[in-house]
Image (spheres, rainbow, N blue to C red):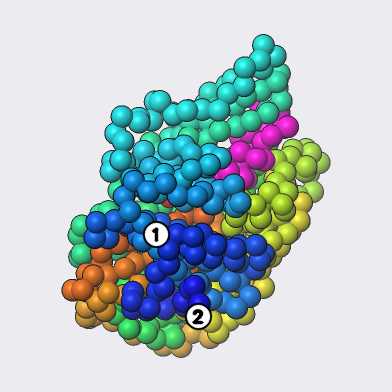
């Protein structure tokens, strides 16, 4: 067997992971020819005098994650996976950017993030090799990295024929913070939890949960059922809050001001629910490994139920209005289309996949916490356009409201727990998958002989899905870019790390 099979957030000794030669390692990626498999992480780390490549491929039918590795020498020239599996381009670009490895015949061998520890510091962000077409009929439009709106930095380079977009290349990496390195440099769990919270401010619950499950699996800790129910409620509340904010932003981009302000107001109800729960509107401090600092009391459960009832009574009416207005529909329908084949080839996850007919939802395929008990039916749409991405948010909000109601009914008394022993198992690996509102989050941790974190890897769904935006705008007018961009609402800092 070329791989070992584990479950989501299962810890295994590193020695149990097969070490292959590169040809065997390369051929094991044939698993990706099966649509039920997709790569959730692929990275390199220094080991001895060389490097070790680690790969994790998730099987959504068997609910398993296949883990395999290989050792390569520094300076090695390796066959590229990208020409067979285009979605692997981001992984290979990241590895080649930092390590002394070369992927020959790669179709898109460009810098990814410009991290501080890149192997060639002469390659700077202002020298990014943009794709270009030499033609008198075409022109280029550059947008960013500083934008008019209050968003994060990124550069978008369009190649247009008149108003029509032929090609978009997206260059990020302006705010690389070294999150993964900092996770290893400081072994304090409080520090690491704060770091996990800051990976992406709009996915605070998702990323902190992924980190917490890793630490707990490496410690052997199992949280009580009541705490797992509370974590599931927090994850769904975050999904409702961000989806509602995105519906507001979509209304802004099509000049539907009434929808903008009503959805903004509704979002406030949800984030104020977090404020009542843990003292922070974005749920900071709520999730902590092996501890339950803010257990739900009867009063808090009543508050959550009351807030959701107020939200729901107004949300349905507003959503009905929004999706009945011809001017909104005309701007949403058949704009920014991503095809199912593109989604499969580029390994899109989360909303970007589910709006193209691909049922990819970790809550069902690789359940963790209370989702092991509660069955989730992912919402899948087929058109792949802005309308599908807006509708998916609508439907997922309705589903999350129902999930939370059921979870509140199931929740029994919960106790505050603040004591924990953070000794981790030595020489152990764990992979944690969480279905955040944007899609699949993947955190990987490896410990050393002393039980300290020796490697930490984070993957935001945006690593894959930024390419979905680049494909979506092709053959659309450049004026459609803002609404296409907002319909994905991808993360800059989650990508840059």
**Whether residue 7 is situated above or below residue 77 in the rendered picture:** below
On the image, which quarter does residue 432 sit in?
Answer: bottom left
Between discs 2 and 1, the one toward the N terminus: 1
Q: What range of the chain is rendered magenta?
A: 465-489
> Alpha carbon of mark 2 to alpha carbon of mark 1: how far?
32 Å
Q: Position of residue 154 (x, y in %)?
A: 46, 34
Say left or right for 164 vs 146.
Answer: right
Q: Residue at x 48, y 43 (%)?
A: 104
Q: Is residue 99 or residue 146 the one in the foreground?
A: 99
Q: Residue at x 63, y 33 (%)?
A: 481
Q: Is residue 469 magenta?
A: yes
What kind of secondary structure does the magenta stretch mostly adopt?
helix
**Label for residue 370?**
2
* Element type where label 2 sits in the image: helix
On the image, which quarter does residue 249 sit in?
Answer: top right
Crowding around mark 2 (Cα neighbors within 10 Å: few <14, some 14 to 19, many 20+) is many
**Whether residue 203 is situated above or below residue 418 in the rendered picture:** above
Q: Position of residue 302 (x, y in %)?
A: 49, 76
Q: Position of residue 334 (x, y in %)?
A: 78, 42
Q: Is residue 25 or residue 448 the one in the foreground?
A: 25
* Element type where label 1 sits in the image: strand
**Whether residue 95 is situated above or below residue 452 in the rendered picture:** above
**Whether residue 154 is situated above or below residue 241 in the rendered picture:** above
Q: Position of residue 338 (x, y in %)?
A: 70, 46
**Label for residue 53?**
1
| Disc 2 versus disc 1: nearer the observer | 1
Q: Residue at x 50, y 77 (%)?
A: 1
């Amino acid at each position: 067997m070329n791989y070992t099979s584990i479950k989501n957030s299962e810890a295994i000794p590193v020695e149990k992971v097969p070490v292959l030669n590169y040809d065997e390692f390369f051929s094991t990626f044939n698993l990706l020819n099966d649509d039920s498999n997709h790569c959730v992480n692929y990275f390199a780390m220094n080991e001895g005098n060389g490097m070790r490549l680690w790969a994790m491929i998730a099987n959504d039918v068997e609910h398993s994650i296949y883990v395999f590795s290989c050792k390569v020498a520094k300076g090695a020239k390796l066959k590229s996976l990208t020409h067979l599996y285009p979605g692997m381009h981001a992984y290979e670009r990241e590895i080649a950017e930092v390590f002394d490895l070369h992927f020959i015949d790669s179709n898109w061998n460009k810098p990814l993030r410009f991290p501080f520890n890149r192997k060639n510091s002469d390659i700077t962000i202002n020298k990014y090799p943009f794709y270009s077409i030499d033609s008198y009929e075409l022109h280029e439009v550059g947008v960013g990295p500083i934008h008019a709106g209050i968003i994060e930095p990124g550069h978008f380079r369009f190649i247009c024929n008149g108003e029509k977009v032929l090609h978009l290349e997206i260059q990020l990496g302006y705010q690389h913070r070294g999150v993964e390195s900092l996770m290893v440099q400081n072994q304090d769990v409080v520090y690491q939890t704060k770091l996990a919270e800051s990976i992406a401010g709009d996915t605070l619950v998702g990323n902190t949960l992924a980190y917490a499950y890793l630490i707990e699996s490496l410690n052997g800790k199992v949280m009580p059922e009541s705490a797992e129910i509370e974590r599931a409620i927090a994850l769904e509340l975050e999904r409702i809050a961000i989806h509602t904010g995105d519906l507001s932003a979509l209304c802004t981009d099509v000049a539907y001001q009434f929808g903008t302000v009503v959805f903004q107001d509704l979002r406030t109800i949800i984030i104020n629910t977090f404020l009542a729960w843990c003292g922070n509107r974005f749920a900071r401090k709520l999730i902590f490994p092996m501890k339950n600092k803010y257990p739900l009391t009867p009063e808090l459960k009543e508050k959550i139920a009351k807030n959701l009832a107020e939200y729901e009574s107004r949300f349905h009416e507003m959503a009905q209005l929004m999706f009945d207005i011809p001017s909104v529909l005309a701007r949403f329908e058949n704009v920014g289309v991503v095809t199912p084949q593109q989604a499969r080839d580029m390994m899109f996850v989360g909303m970007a996949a589910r709006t193209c007919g691909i049922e990819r939802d970790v809550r069902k395929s690789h359940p963790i916490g209370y989702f092991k008990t509660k069955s989730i039916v992912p919402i899948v749409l087929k058109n792949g356009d802005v309308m599908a991405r807006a509708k998916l948010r609508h439907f997922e909000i309705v589903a999350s409201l129902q999930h939370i109601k059921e979870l509140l009914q199931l929740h029994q008394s919960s106790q505050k727990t603040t004591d924990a022993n953070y000794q981790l198992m030595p020489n152990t690996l764990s992979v944690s998958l969480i279905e955040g509102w944007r899609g699949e989050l993947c955190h990987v941790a490896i410990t050393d002989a002393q039980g300290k974190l020796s490697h930490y890897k984070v993957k935001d769904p945006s690593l894959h899905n930024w390419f979905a935006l680049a494909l979506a705008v092709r053959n659309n007018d450049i004026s459609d870019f803002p609404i296409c961009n907002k319909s994905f609402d991808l993360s800059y800092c989650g990508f840059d790390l």
